[in-house]
Each structure stands twice: as C-alpha cells, then as structure tokens.
Image (cartoon, rainbow, N blue to C red):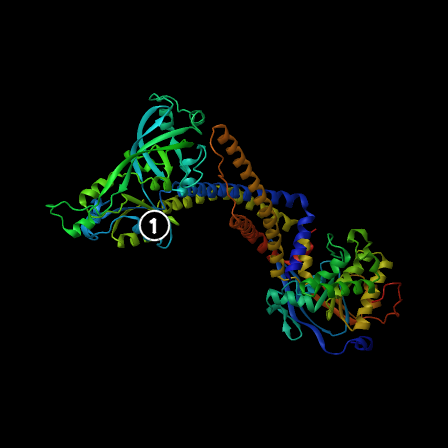
Amino acid sequence: MNSQSSLHSNGSVAIATDNVCRHYRMGETLIRAVDGVSLQIHAGEFVALLGTSGSGKSSLLNLLAGLDRPTSGQVIVAGKNLAALSREELAKYRLHTVGMVFQSFNLIPSMTLSENVELPMRFAEVERQQRAALSTKALQRVGLAARMHHRPVELSGGEQQRAALARALINQPKTLLADEPTGNLDSRTGTEIMELISDCNRSLGMTVIMVTHERSLAERYAQRMVFLADGKVVGDQPASVAEPAEVLPGGRL
Amino acid sequence: MKIYDLTELAVRNLRESLLRNSLTTVGISVGVASLVAMLALGIGLQQLASRRLRKSGLFDTVIVTSRRDLRSFSREQESSGPDPADSPALDEPARQKMEQLPDVTEAFPDIRFITGLRYEGKQHLTMVAGLPFSAKNNDAFDGMQGNFFSSDAAPEVILQKAFAEELLGKTPKPGADDVNVADVARPLLGKELVMRYAERVEAPLSAAPQPGDRQDPNEAALSASYSVVSHEQPLKIVGVSDLDPDSMRGSARARVFLPLKLAQNLHVMQPSNLRDTTRALTSAPTYTTVSVRVKSPRLVPTVEDAIKKMGFNTFSITDATRSLRQFFAVLDLFLGIFGSLALAVASIGIVNTLVMAILERRREIGIMKALGASDIDIRKLFFAEAGAMGLAGGAVGVALGWMIGHAINLGTNVYLKRQNFPPEQIWAVPWWLVGGAVLFAIVVSLISGLYPASRAARLDPVQALRYE
C-alpha cells in the first residue's frame, strides 16, 4: 500500500476475503467465477477491481455485498463471516453496512426520485417525517433537489446515477460498492459521478470498492487496483496518484 | 417494514397494473357477492320460518288442564302427580298464579261454546271462541279482511271465511276453486250479528235447605249452585279471516271469534260447568283449559315443569325450532359452499395475478433485496397486495351481494303481490355477514398470496438483478 492509500485508510480491515470461491454449474461445465480470492480491504480505502468481461469482478462484488454466498472460503466483515449469516442477517448487512450503485442505475421506474431514495429507509423503519427530510437533503447534495418528484424515466443517465448514489448512501453505510457506475454514461457525466464517489471516500472516509474495466478511471480515482482474470487475483497494486478532483457544479457530496 | 409503509407500497404497486388488478378484484367481488347472496337468502328464509313459527303460537304455548277432568295427555301424567280429587281447580286464582311465573307472557283461559248466531233473521249454529288480544300478531290473521278487535272487550266479532260463506248462503261445492276472502268479506264487514247465549248466574248460597234434606253443612258450602239465563248480544263484524286461527283445536275449532275479555264478561255457560256441578267440588267457575304463552320456545320445558308442580296436566309441542335451526345450519352450509365456489375461482385469479406480478417485478424485487429488503419484507409486501385486493373485492362484493339480494326480494314481492299474498322479507344481511364476508375475502386472498409471496421472497437477488 502506498502513502496515498494510507492517507485515506485508517489501517483497520473493513472487508477481508479468505480463499473465497464462487463456482456454479452451467450444464456440464463448472464455471469458476471467483476462484480462491484472498483480499484485505482497509477502512477508508478506495479499491478498483479491474478485469475483462467474465473475469469475475462483478461476482466478487456480489459476494462482498452479501447478495451471493461463496461456494467455499470466507468473506469477513467486522469479524463476521458473511457466508455463515442467515438470509435475514445478510439483508440487515446490505441495509446498514454497505450501499450499492449499479451500471444500469436500478432505480425503480414507478417511483419518483425521492421515493426511490426513501426506499432503504422504509426497510430500516425510519419514521416518515425524518425520511422525507433525509431524502430531500440527500438529493440536494447530488444536485437533484429540483427533480425529486420526477420519475427516473424523465431524467438523464447521469442524473439517474446521482439519484442512485444518493439512495446508496442514505442509510450511512460504511462501504460503498459500485459495479461499473460509469459504464452507461458518457465520459463527462462519468467524471461527475466519479467525483461524487471520490468525495464520499475522501470527505466521509467511506470505503469504496468499485468494479470497472476502465484502467484510466481506476488510476485517477482509486488508491489501489486489484486485477482479476478467470476468477483469480492476478495483480494487486497501488494506483498512480490522481490529480486533485475538479469541483463540478452541483456535484459535490 | 412498518404497516403503513407496506400498505402504501402495496397500493402503489396495485395502481401500477390497474387494469389487471381491477379485474382480479372484480373476480373476488363476484365471488363474495355470490357468497353473500346465497347466505343472505338462507338467513332470510330461516328468519322467515322462525317468524312464522313464533307467530303461529304453536311452540311457545303450554296447554294446561286440570287433573280433575281425568283427561291427561299421557299415561305417565295419569300415574304421576297428585290424586285427581286432591288436585287444584283450574280457576281464576290458578290462572293468575301461572301468569306470574317467570318467563310467562300471558295465561288465558280457553272459552268456547256452541251457540246460535242470527244474521238477517236466519239462525246459524256454530262454535264460538274467545281470542286474547295478543292473537292480533298471529299469522293466521295475515291476509284478514277488515280489522282485529278494537279492544279486548269490544262487542265485535271476527268470522272465519267458511262461516262467512255460510252467512251469505254460499256453501262452496267440494273441489270448487277457493273463494277470495275479499269477496266474502265485502258484504259482511260492519254488519251486525246477534249471538244467543246462556249466561251462568250465581245463585245465592243462603237458600235454606229443605227440611228432610240429607245435606251436610260442609257439603253445602262446596256445592255449586247457579242458574242459567238466556241472553242475546249484538256483535259487529269487524273482520273475516282467510286462514283458520283455530286449526289446532281439531273438531272443537271455532268459526267465530270474540274478544276474550268480552267472552269472559258474558259468563257464558261452559260445557265443563255441568260436569263440575255434578262433581260438586266448587261453586266458582273453572276453566277447561288455560293457554300459557312463554317468552321463547326454549323456555317452554321450564315453565311446563313449574305448572306441573302446581298440580296440573300440561301439554306442549316439542321445540320444533331446534330441528329448524339444524335444518337451516345445513342449508346455510350448502348455500355457503356454492357461494364459495365463485370465490375459489377468484382466488385462482389472485394467484395468477400475483405470479404475473412477480415475473414483471422480478428486477424490482432484486433491487429491493440489494437495498436491504429482507425475505420477510418482500413476503409481507406481496401479502399486503393480496390482502388489499381481498379487502377491496370483499367490500365491493358485499355491496354487490346486497344489491342482488334486494333485487331478488323485490322480484319475489312483486310476484307475491300478484298472487294476493302479503309482502315478505326473504332476505337478510346481518352485520356479522357483512364483516364475515369481507374477512373471508381477505383470508382467501391471503391464502392465495401464500405461494406467490414465498416465491417472491425466495428470489435470488443476483438472478433477479440480471433480469431485464
């Protein structure tokens, strides 16, 4: 780990994987989506998982998010092995410990932006009034206060991803997991989103694990790059020091 | 998730596929409506039958006779109870005592006698009976022409249709069509009849015994002595009854009815008086029979026991309402099953709608799970949707069933009116049926939602998120 990465990480391990595997069968073939990955990700670290399509980076992210269970090995978060948690406990982990953003935004089309942002708070049983105030504040932070009563279909891709980011952060998770967050965006909008994510990492001290296949993005924003191929870690190195982030209008968290 | 959040999300989801969910809800409504219509018909018929039975006065009446008459209703009664000679007389004090028993509404003597009635100069011989004022509500007077007695002692008379025909000189030929009571009553109502009767006049007890009589002084006090005086009483015809109010009496049934108080005040000589005279046990008038009306058919056995303890013979018709209730319980069950068939079909509609919703909202379920929704949250959400459809379907269904029932009732009454019958309420929707039907719709919907809800809850979030 270089000096840049230690600048943001506070040294304690946020997520650790120990020889974690995720294999599944497709007909006769055994697919080794994740195959013996051991990683230690420190609190406050910004890690980019890089690799080509099918290298297992999204599968690994799903394991870290508690959306999927490993075939073998362990995923340790705050001393708990996710593989040993019940479905209810995993749901609680996803609700409070991690926040997720996806390539395709995954906003619920029938809900307005504020309703989308409020959704995780409904699961967390936050009071209605508090919920409304928090969602307004979160949307203001991503510069979408004026669009809060719009439905996703009425917004651009960048706006949708900003709303998705506001939603991912609404329950104040310790870790942000981003699966190709700029994959569906043009480079300018992608940069906006990356700035917001980077700001979460720097100003809030949030651990960020981002899946991407764009090395340039990783080098610019991440502190560490983990390369995957055929489900295995084939490289783990510090990213080059990025230029200070540009401040984008309405795009600061 | 909190209940109001669940409700809000469920209603939102239902609104998203408005047409499909509305059609499913209509399916439930039709099911509930058929259930409500069937059960309301069953309940209405049961209430009608109970009302009829109660009004007939057959099952809430205890007939009381004196053991002195040696006319018991069974061998068991003959052998049990006090010796006839020691048993009390069925007289006015005894009647009053019976009236004061708990759960007794009234106790009235049976006064009937055969006498001559003169109408337009012609004599007619028939049985005349006193009717208590409470008989006004008896269903035998449904369809009666004219009115019931204006008071309990008014010099008025109600005729049975057959006697009215006799007065008019129209004796129906056997096999001929029934004469309409209105046609018979029209020329008679308001007219006057003169009743000839024998009044029992108490003779003074001071009549000195003739010398040489072997009369014991005690026996003299006990012996009945009275004279019989012939009288005439003009009576106004106020009503002609279509049915036979006295059908229970068999051969002793009367065709002419007087208000009971009037009949008592006239002190008409009763056939039993003569028997009492020969037995020489009392000088006070006694009754052949006393009818005791009880508050409810269920209380008849208790009252009967109390009267037996007083030393009288009693007779009542076994509580037929019990078997009636049993019959209607079975009828309601069958009607309910038939009604529920439509609801069963509707429940398949719910399963179908919700399974379709899972397919459509697969990705949404995946997103919710990724955001932290638990299996229980997803299950509850689908349950809430099923429950909301059940509630809406139930409420609309009850309203629909109520309207169908009213339409049936209206149709039936139009038919009854055409057939010259009084209107009847064959339809009843009690509050428990309204609540029960809505609750049943919700329960059926929730059961239908079981499978879709658990299927949605089990969805693998990774698979669901991949779904486009």
Residue B183 relative to residue A92: left or right: left
Q: Nearer the viewer, residue A108 or A105?
A: A108
**Res. B96 in view:** yes
Question: x and y percent of residue B222 in the render?
Answer: 20, 49
Is B416 above or below relative to B462?
Answer: above
Q: Amino acid at mark 1?
A: Val
Q: Nearer the viewer, residue B215 or B35?
A: B215
Quarter of the figure with the N terminus of chain B = bottom right
Residue found at x 39% / y 42%: B53
- Mark 1 surroundings within 10 Å by alpha-carbon count, few (fewer than 14), some (14 through 19), many (20 or more): many
Q: Nearer the viewer, residue B352 or B289?
A: B289
Question: x and y percent of residue A89 in the render?
Answer: 62, 67
Question: x and y percent of residue A234 in the render?
Answer: 73, 67
Residue A5 relative to residue A15: left or right: right
Residue found at x 63% / y 73%: A80
Q: In the rendered image, which quarter is residue B261 located in?
A: top left
**Res. A28 in view:** no
Residue B127 relative to residue A17: left or right: left
Q: Chain of mark 1?
A: B
Residue found at x 81% / y 53%: A155
Q: Say what secondary structure mark 1 lies in.
A: helix
On the image, numbered disc 1 is attached to which residue? B300
| Number of numbered discs overlaid on the protein picture | 1
Question: x and y percent of residue B206 in the render?
Answer: 22, 48
Is A227 above or below relative to B114?
Answer: below
Residue found at x 38% / y 29%: B193
Q: In the rendered image, which quarter is residue B100 located in?
A: bottom left
Residue B93 relative to residue B451: left or right: left
